[in-house]
Image (cartoon, rainbow, N blue to C red):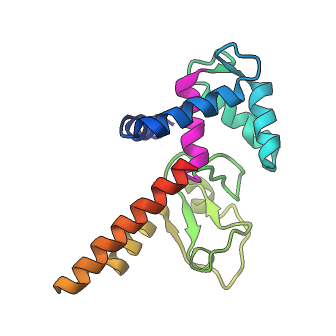
Amino acid sequence: MEEVRETVKAFYARLPESQKDEVTKFFNSLDKDGDGKITVEEFMAWVKQRGFKSLNRYESIFKELDKDENGTLDFDEVLMLFYLYKSGRFVFCDGCGSFIKGNYFTCLKCFNAGMSAEGCDLCCSCYGSNNFNHREDHATFVDSHALIISIWRKNKPSKSDKDQMEFVTGVFHFAEVLLGIFAS
């Protein structure tokens, strides 16, 4: 989880002030009693409000977020929740159900089809030990890092100036989309 914490710190350090204000508003919206800390009850109320399933998964995430293990979440710990939520980084293993903190394996056919189905995302342990059930015709799994690299290679610009300009324009569009996601 420390690698994710480092990512979140870097993310927050580079946010414009308006988006830092959004994180503060998010924290305050969770802190129903205004005491400056988020209890497990306040956190679970947010989870239920969002309609997340498998509530026991989120109770374990609360424990993961609570770095100092004092039973509450402070601002920095909620910042991590904000990042995980806004970036879509709540990934659970479809084998064992645990929250996946780092690299994981995903079904390539499901990914390409935009599907989210049982058995699509697996922690390294479940993938390596074959602890999952998935469709027989969906046998190709790749790790998350290799998936990103393959997408980049597929979209890599050619040497022509026109293609390079289209690529740069696409990158700026992608960045605008990401800013829109984090701004909403």
Q: Is residue 147 above or below residue 180?
A: below
Q: Is residue 69 left or right of residue 177?
A: right
Camera-side residue: 90 or 146?
Answer: 90
Q: Position of residue 56 (x, y in %)?
A: 80, 40
Question: In the image, what residue occupies the spot 51% across and 56% down?
Answer: 180
Q: Verify whether residue 166 appears in magenta.
A: no
Q: Residue at x 75, y 42 (%)?
A: 57
Foreground residue among 156 and 92: 156
- Above or below 70: residue 155: below
Residue in the foreground of this view, choosing between 29 and 145: 29
Asked if one can make out residue 159 in the rendered structure from this viewpoint, the answer is no
Q: Is residue 31 left or right of residue 159?
A: right
Predominant SS of the magenta segment: helix
Name the spot of residue 89 as percent of width and height, x first.
Answer: 57, 51
The magenta-colored residue range is 74-88
Rendered position, 138 above or below 18:
below
Q: Where is 87 relative to 159, above or below?
A: above
Query: As drawn, which residue projects farthest toward the front?
Result: 18
Image quadrant where residue 121 sits: bottom right
Q: Position of residue 64 (x, y in %)?
A: 62, 32
Q: Residue at the location (70% across, 82% down)? A: 136
Q: Quadrant of residue 25?
A: top right
Q: Does the magenta segment cover residue 85?
A: yes
